[in-house]
């Protein structure tokens, strides 16, 4: 008899299945929409304005025609994946990253490997909290080098980097895309209520660190039971014993350039409101500088670029593929209908059950609208008035929305950034789900306790 994880299809098959389901639902679910008004340049649904409209079913021809549009809407994310791959390709060719990781792990010693896993998990969690999601794609391969260097595998690398960034971003008290957008819609002070959210976020990252350390200990006892058995590690492993690593002046200069780029990126994001396009350009600038410093011939430079693109192309493709689902739902005019009926299920429940129900409502919506800000604009104008009727504070509704959106991102095949990052770690989706699902269920249970607490304390904007 097959185990449950053996029934998990390849992400391509899974996404295509969701796409076909969305097309079928466009024939079954009534088409409808909310009236929308523009606020701060974004279209917000008007509560109570839902109405039926003429059906717009998506037949098989329209479904396939939606693919180019899906890739078009995701082009910014697709290109940041390609540009980060090119940049890391030149960093890898320089040898600086490998020498830096080898020297660092050698200095750290065998006894401090668990501490390193915890520290790196919190580091990637911090990147998710403060820098966003896809912005961190360039940092993912470094975790692979570190994990393999300390005796871990690529699953552990994904746990540290992808898990850290996803949980940090999903539960961040300062997430501009989810919490920021939600607070604007709810007319709450920006990033208010940060105390409770910060505690939940810390617990989430700490639980992931424990999960990662526990997995590393299992690998040390029985390496053959690791989920990373058989995964391709070429180009991510250290090429010589740890004792032989040292840093040259050129390596130090290259790493300083990389760190300098990260500083410029942080300033750009927070000071000049840079987003994916500007960050992609910054990655390419560093790649160009590294190519000049390498003093290699043009044929070698061309090979590095194309080899790097080839490594990240599957992840980039998955981003565009996943975006097609949202396009099909919009073509079928059923997004608003789904939000309308899901919110209606909450009416009549006790306040704490309604708040818990909102978490599951948002979790379901997250598979249809994986964009946090897009989901906020589509569902919160509907859920906030429902919450008011049920006696829930606006802050509780926003918290329920954030949890529902943020934690299911850990296993959401429609979230292109997630699929791209685990692809960069060379981890199959089914193995990632096997690794992260137990932790995700624990975090959801803990988060629901926080939601109930928020109801009991009448969680306000402070």
Image (spheres, helix red, strand yellow):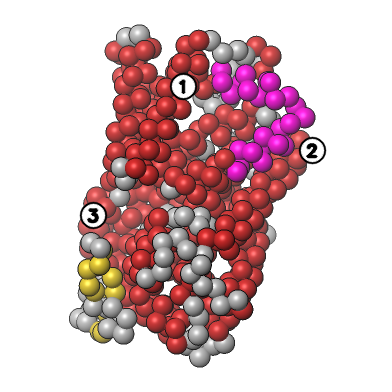
Q: Position of residue 314 (x, y in %)?
A: 40, 40
- Residue 111, placed above or below residue 353: above
Residue 406 appears left or right of 216:
left
- Residue 166, placed above or below residue 239: below
Camera sees residue 4: no
Q: Which residue is mark 1?
A: 256
Earlier along the polypeptide chain: callout 3 or callout 2?
3
| Helix, strand or loop under label 3 | helix
Q: Of discs 3 and 1, which sits in the foreground?
A: 1
Q: Which residue is mark 2?
A: 221
Q: Nearer the viewer, residue 380 or 34?
A: 380
How many numbered tags mark residues here? Answer: 3
Tag shown at residue 169: none
Camera sees residue 51: yes
Quarter occupied by residue 83:
top left
Name the residue at the right extreme: 221
Earlier along the polypeptide chain: callout 2 or callout 1?
2
How much space separates mark 2 and mark 1, taking CA atoms?
37 Å
- Residue 37, placed above or below residue 387: above
Tag shown at residue 69: 3
Earlier along the polypeptide chain: callout 3 or callout 1?
3
Residue drawn at (42%, 32%) of the image:
263
Instruction: State which region is magenta.
Output: 99-122
User: Which image quarter holds the N terminus?
Assistant: bottom right
Residue drawn at (72%, 37%) of the image:
114
Q: Is mark 3 in CB contact (under 8 Å) with mark 2?
A: no
């Amino acid at each position: 008899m097959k185990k449950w994880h053996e029934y998990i299809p390849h992400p391509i098959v899974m996404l295509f299945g969701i796409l076909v389901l969305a097309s079928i639902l466009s024939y079954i679910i009534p088409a409808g929409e909310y009236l929308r008004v523009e606020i701060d340049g974004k279209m917000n649904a008007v509560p109570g304005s839902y109405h039926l409209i003429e059906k717009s079913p998506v037949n098989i021809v329209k479904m396939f025609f939606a693919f180019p549009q899906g890739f078009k809407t995701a082009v910014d994310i697709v290109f940041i994946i390609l540009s980060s791959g090119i940049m890391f390709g030149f960093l890898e060719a320089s040898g600086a990253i490998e020498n830096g990781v080898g020297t660092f792990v050698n200095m750290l010693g065998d006894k401090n490997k668990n501490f390193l896993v915890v520290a790196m998990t919190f580091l990637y969690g911090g990147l998710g909290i403060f820098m966003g999601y896809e912005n961190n794609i360039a940092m993912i391969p470094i975790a692979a080098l570190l994990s393999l260097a300390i005796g871990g595998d690529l699953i552990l690398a994904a746990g540290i980097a992808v898990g850290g960034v996803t949980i940090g971003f999903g539960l961040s008290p300062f997430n501009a895309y989810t919490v920021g957008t939600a607070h604007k819609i709810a007319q709450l002070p920006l990033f208010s209520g940060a105390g409770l959210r910060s505690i939940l976020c810390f617990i989430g990252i700490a639980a992931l660190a424990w999960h990662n350390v526990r997995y590393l200990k299992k690998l040390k006892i029985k390496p053959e039971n690791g989920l990373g058995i058989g995964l391709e590690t070429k180009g991510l492993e250290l090429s010589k014993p740890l004792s032989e690593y040292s840093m040259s002046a050129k390596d130090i200069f290259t790493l300083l350039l990389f760190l300098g780029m990260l500083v410029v990126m942080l300033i750009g994001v927070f000071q000049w409101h840079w987003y994916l396009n500007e960050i992609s350009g910054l990655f390419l600038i560093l790649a160009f500088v590294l190519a000049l410093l390498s003093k290699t011939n043009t044929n070698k430079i061309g090979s590095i670029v194309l080899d790097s693109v080839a490594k990240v192309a599957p992840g980039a493709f998955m981003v565009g593929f996943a975006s097609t689902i949202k396009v099909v739902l919009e073509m079928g005019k059923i997004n608003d209908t789904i939000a309308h009926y899901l919110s209606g299920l909450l009416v009549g429940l006790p306040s704490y059950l309604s708040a818990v129900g909102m978490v599951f409502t948002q979790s379901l919506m997250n598979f249809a609208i994986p964009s946090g800000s897009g989901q906020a604009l589509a569902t919160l104008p509907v859920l906030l008035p429902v919450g008011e009727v049920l006696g829930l504070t606006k802050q509780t509704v926003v918290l329920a929305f954030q949890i529902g959106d943020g934690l299911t991102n850990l296993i959401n095949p429609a979230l292109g950034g997630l699929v791209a990052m685990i692809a960069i770690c060379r981890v199959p989706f089914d193995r990632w789900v096997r690794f992260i699902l137990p932790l995700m269920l624990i975090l959801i249970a803990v988060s629901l306790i926080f939601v109930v607490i928020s109801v009991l304390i009448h969680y306000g904007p402070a």
